[in-house]
Image: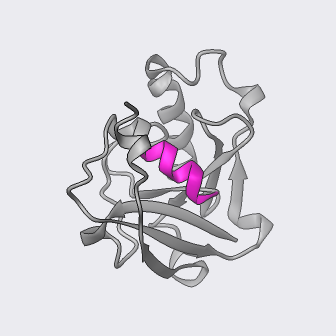
Amino acid sequence: MEVFRIVKKDFAANLYASGRANRWNVDDQFVIYTGGSRSLSTLELIVHKNAIEPTFKYQVMIISIADEEELFTSVLQADLSKSWRTMTAYPELQNIGSKWYQSNQSLVLKVPSAVITKEYNYIINTRHADFAAKVSLVRSEDYFWDNRLLDPK
């Protein structure tokens, strides 16, 4: 399957994980957040960054993950609290993601998008034994920001 990640051009040449905490991981857990589509990845980046700096050049990374069912673990929205989309739910979600990461049970954690209902993000564990063999950067492409997304006046 192909998943997508939008990053500043300087970071688009390789599959890099910073190890910084986010919605589904804590510090020192090296994961790559990706979206199931370019459009979802766009919206996730906008809400995560609170603003996009159009002075930077961005690229979309097209990442291939082997289509093998055992490589994926899914988090069902029905199993999450009603407030899972809020910032106050971060500790709950980080706990779920951290347990998944530490257990090494799969290469990818499929999670519901907090931005778009019925769409999914895919979190890739770069320290998983299958990472090098089952995940690859297909290519990076220049990314165009529609000014209406950045300045809706």
Position of 29 with respect to 81 (left or right) is left
Q: Is residue 37 above or below residue 136?
A: above
Q: Foreground residue, 107 or 103?
A: 107
Magenta range is 37-45
Q: Is residue 53 above or below residue 61?
A: above
Q: Is residue 42 magenta?
A: yes
Q: Is residue 94 magenta?
A: no
Q: Foreground residue, 68 or 61?
A: 61
Picture quadrant of residue 77: top right
Residue 94 location (% of width, % of height): 47, 35
- The residue at the point 69 percent across, 66 percent down is 71
- The residue at the point 76 percent across, 65 percent down is 70
- The residue at the point 65 percent across, 18 percent down is 81
Residue 88 location (% of width, % of height): 45, 17
Screen quadrant of the C terminus: top left
Residue 56 location (% of width, % of height): 22, 59
Q: Foreground residue, 58 or 11?
A: 58
